[in-house]
Image: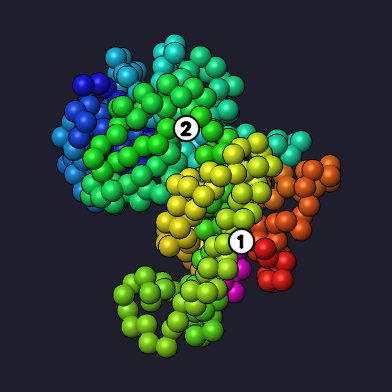
Amino acid sequence: MSIITIIGAGMMGSAISWPATDNGHIVRLVGSNLNDSVIESIKKTGIHPALKCKLPENVFPFYFSEIKEAIPDTELFVCGVSSFGLEWFATEVLPFLPQDAHLMVLTKGLLSNHDGYLHTTLHYFNEYRPDLNISAVGGPCICSELIGRHLTMVSCCAAELSTAQHLKALLNTNYYHLQPTTDVIGVECAVAIKNTYAVGVALALGMAEREAGITDARPSSWQTGADTTGFTPYYNHQAALFAQSCLEMRRLVRLFGGNEDVVSGLAGAGDLYVTSQGGRNGRLGVLLGRGLSMAQIQEALGDVTLESVPITKRVAEAVRIRAKHGEVSLKQFPLLLHLDALISHQPSTIDWESFG
């Protein structure tokens, strides 16, 4: 039995409590600076308001102001904040972690550099704390399925294989399976940019709905279970976008220094498949496919966090810089550039003949 301290009480961070406690560990769930209402609910009722269920018995909630109480004797720390909270985590949390501590990162993100290179979350955190043993998990993992103990398989990566294997030993269960690898760049790039391409695959659903006369921001009938008479989602269309997404993801992972074969596995095609089927990024793609502008979409979705937006802009800008240096051709990324134009409020149409 070990103590696992999760910082960030969002849905995914909290969901890791299930495999952790099922393996007999004690979980200390520390809310971020934005999670006070979540922690308050858990303290009073045991119920996580977003997951809409009680957390396992061995989960103990802490406000961020109580973080010092949650640190002693911790075997594994978990970063459960969104990509928008990376800087906050680096400056407000990392200084509290003990020397040589183990940190698992759930956050998916790539950080820009002026020279066209992108840094993974692990590299970013290592700049602040080079002494830490940092690993990351990435792959197709829907919170509701994980907490329902349905089979979930993900990649876990670290610079040292022993670090990834240590993570697997702590969290692997008969339903939560971790595959260790040392390809940090490949896994982290794939799981980040799949958010961009999930928007691309979902464009096909929105385009089909637009043909059926749906041009506003209403929920999709195929998601709500409402009458779908007269609506065909056009699977060939989705398949073309999915195939191009995988092709461009392979090119990007190779460009940024990872093993492109990762894209054929859990962190690439696997995660892309799950993400494009629904969720926030899939929803964005559907609405763009219907012809809505980003301004209209942002008004309709409100304060929903769309991590695909900054990822798309950063990756597209990095590709343009590298193209200027002659390291790559923009012609290899027609879907990426189309998505970047849509997200940047620029008119754009898909050049299907450029695919492949």
What's the amino acid at mark 1? Gln
Q: How many marks?
A: 2
Q: Which residue does the image show at 30% across and 27% down from the upper left?
A: 170
Q: Which residue is mark 1?
A: 244
Mark 2 lies on a secondary structure that is: strand
Q: Report if residue 41 is visible in the image.
A: no
Secondary element type, mark 1: helix
Label 2 CA crowd tier, 10 Å (few <14, some 14–19, many 20+): many
The structure residue drawn at horizontal position 45% and vertical position 58%, both measured from the top left corner, is 273
Badge 1: residue crowd in 10 Å (few <14, some 14–19, many ≥20):
many
The C terminus: image quadrant: bottom right
In the picture, measured across the screen, residue 111 lies left or right of residue 8, that is right
Q: Earlier in the sequence, mark 1 or mark 2?
A: 2
Q: Is residue 340 left or right of 231 when viewed as pictured?
A: right
State the image coordinates of residue 186 (x, y, percent, origin top left).
56, 39
**Front position in the image: 157 or 40:** 157
Q: Could you tell me if residue 355 is visible in this image?
A: yes
Position of residue 269 in the picture relative to residue 249 (left or right)? left
* Magenta span of residues: 288-294
Q: Quadrant of the N terminus?
A: top left
User: Is residue 79 in the magenta section?
Assistant: no
Q: Between residues 304 and 229, which one lies in front from this camera angle?
A: 229
Residue 289 in magenta? yes
Disc 2 designates what residue?
Answer: 181
With respect to residue 95, does 323 lie above or below?
Answer: below
- Identify which residue, 305 or 202, lies in the foreground: 202
Measured as percent of width and height from the top left, residue 153 is found at 36, 44
Would you identify the image quadrant in which residue 35 lies?
top left
